[in-house]
Image (cartoon, grey):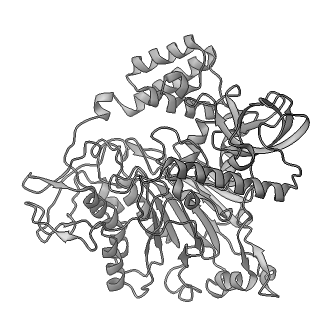
Amino acid sequence: MSLSSLLGCNDVAMTERYANLATQLDITNSDLANNWEAFSLSHDDADHTDANFALFRTFVQSIVKKNGPKEDRKRPAQVMGSPSPNPNVKAAKTESNVTATMVGSSNTARISTSPGPGYEDRKNAGQIVAHLNVNLPEKAVLKDGDIGFTSLTPVKIGGSDFKCNVDKKYRYMFTTLPERARALDQRLTKMAGEMEERYGMENVSAVGVPCTEEVQVVGRICNEAHEGRINKTSVVLEGDRGNAGGARIELGLEALKTYSVFPGQIVGVQGLNPSGRKMVAKKICEGVPKPMAKSKAGELMKLQYDDRNGQPLSVFAASGPFTTSGDLDYAPLVDLLAIASRLQPDAVILTGPFVDVNHPLCKDGEVNFEDVDGNKVPVTYETVFQDRVARTIEEFFDDGQACPTQFILVPSLEDAFHDNVYPQPPFADRIQGGVVMDIPGGEGIKVGTLGIEDVEEVVKQKQTQTHKRVHCVSNPATFKINDVVFGVTSVDPILALNTNQASVNINRMERMAQHLIQQQSYYPIFPAPKSAANLDLRHLDKFSMEVTPDVLILPSKLAPFAKDVMGSVVINPTTLAKGNTGGSYASITVHPMKREELEGDGDIEMEHKVKERARVVVQKI
C-alpha cells in the first residue's frame, strides 16, 4: 500500500515530505503511518498541514530516539532466559543476574541473563493513564481469617450460554467465493430486518431504484477505490442481492453535519436518489445494537450476595506482548502476576500475543535456549509458551496459598504457534499431554504441549479449591464471570477502524467502539486491511455479538481509554510491554447491585447495569 494511502494524504508534495522524513529516520512507511495515527488522535484528528507536519516531525523524532538506533532494535537472536516467574519474589528481578529452569527437564538447565534495558529503569510504574467511575471504592483484599473470607464462592466462568464462541479447531482456507458472498448477503439481510423493526422503517426501497421523493434504503458501505483509505468522495452503497441485485450507487455525504462510515458497515440511509446512480444522504442510521444481557433477580441475588456476601467482583485485563522487544524474559508478565498475588483478583484476562511472531527473537523462525554449558538448545514456540507463560502461572499457584484467582487466555493472530484465522479457536495441545524428546542439553522437555494442564495439576496438589483455574477461550470470546458478560477480542478492530473510516465532527475513540456495538460484530470491517485479519466468512456468525457485552475489552495499539459506550463499559488496556519498556493493564472492580433492587420476585429479568457499578483504572505496569 502506498504511503499516501497509509496516511490518508492526497497532497503529493506533503506525501513527499513524509517519505523524506521516514528516510531520514530510517523507519518504514508503516511505522511512520502508525505514528501519525497516534499523533492524530492526540491532536483532535489533525489534518496534513505545514504546522501539523512540524509538530509531527518532533513527535516521531522523540519516539525513534526513545526506541534507540535501528540496528539495536533488530539485533540477532541471543541468549534467552527469564527472571524467576514466582510472583512473590518480585525483588529478584532487580538482581544483576537471575536464573530460570527449563520446563520438564530432569537435569536442571540454568540460564543466566540480565533484564532488558529500559524496562527496569522505567519511572512511571503505577501511573494511571485512563479511568472510569473512580468515585467508586476499590475492592478490599480479604485475607484468611477476615470476616467473609471463607464463605466466598469462587466466581463462575463460562461461555456455554453463547453460541457465537468457537469451541474447537475447524478447517479453514476452504471458503469459496459464492460462500463468502452468501455470508455477507445474509448478514446484510438480517441486519436490515432488525433495523426496520427496531426503528420503524417503512416502505424501504431497494438500493439503486430512482425516486424523486425521499426514500429509505439499507445497504453496505464500500470503498469505490477498492484500496487505500476510504474518503467522502469514494463512498458507495451496496444493496442486497435479493431486492437490489447487489447494485452499487454513489453515496453523497455533503449534506450531513456529522458522520462516520467505513467499508463493511451496514447502514440505513434516508435521502434523495433521483437518477438511480447517486443518493444524497439526509440522515444515516449507523446500525442496530443487540440488547444488553439480562438475568433473573433471584440469580443475581445468589451470585452477588449469597455466594459473595456483597463483595465486589475484581478482574485484571492485560494484552500481549508480555515481554520486551530485547529479550524473552517476560518480566512485565511476572510483575503483573506479582500484583495479582498481592491483590488477588477473581479473574485475570490475558489476551495474546503470548509468543509474538513479530518479536525480534522469534520472527526468524528459530528460537534457541542456552544451557549451563553454553550449548544452544532449539525449542519450539510452544515450548517458549510452556516455559515462559504456563510456568509463570503455575508458580503463581505453587506457593500453596488459597488464592481464588482464575485465568482466561485469549489467543491472537500474532501468536506464532496458533492458527492464523479469524475467528480463532482456543489454545489446545498439538499433541495431547505432549511427548518427551531427547534433546541434548534439554532432556525431559515436552514437545507439542502448552503446559496448561500442568498448571491445573499443581493447583490440585497445592490447594484445597479444585475448580478449574485456566480457561482457554476463542478469539473473539463472549463469556460470563458470575453475572457480568465480557466480550474480548485481540485483533485490534479499533486500529483497523481508525485507518479505514471517513468521518466528520466525531469523538473518534468513542465512535469506533460504538461501531462494533451498532454493527453487532467484533470485526465489522470488510474487506479487512492487508495483514490485519485473515477472515473466514463461513464462520462470520462466530465473530458476531449475541448480546451487547456489559464489559467490552478491546486491546489496541492506540491510546488507552475506559468509556461508557451505549451502556457497555469499553476498555483499551493497550499492551503490557511496549518496545523495550512497560505498557499498561486494566483493573476492573464491579460492585453488587443494591440488595433492595433484587428482593421480591426472583423471576423478574433485569439488565445488569454494569456501567453504573464498575470502577475501571488503566495503569502502567
- Residues 468 and 332: in front is 468
From the top left corner, tell me how far across and down residue 59 is, in percent.
52, 26
Corner quadrant of residue 402:
bottom left
From the top left corner, tell me how far across and down residue 382 is, in percent.
28, 60
Using the image, determine if residue 203 lies above or below residue 164. Answer: above
- Residues 421 and 595: in front is 421
Point 50% across, 33% down: residue: 34
- Residues 382 and 420: in front is 420
From the top left corner, tell me how far across and down residue 152 is, in percent.
56, 85
Using the image, determine if residue 33 lies above or below residue 461. Answer: above
Q: Is 383 situated left or right of 155 in this image?
A: left
In the picture as drawn, the residue positioned furthest to the right comes out as 213
Using the image, determine if residue 1 lies above or below residue 437. Answer: above
In the rendered image, is residue 115 in sight?
A: yes
Q: Is 247 situated left or right of 368 in this image?
A: right
In the rendered image, is residue 559 in sight?
A: no
Point 37% across, 53% down: residue: 415
Point 26% across, 74% down: residue: 433
Number of disc labels: 0
Q: Is 550 situated left or right of 82 in this image?
A: right
Point 29% across, 64% down: residue: 386
Using the image, determine if residue 335 lies above or below residue 159. Answer: above
From the top left corner, tell me how far across and down residue 150 is, in percent.
53, 88
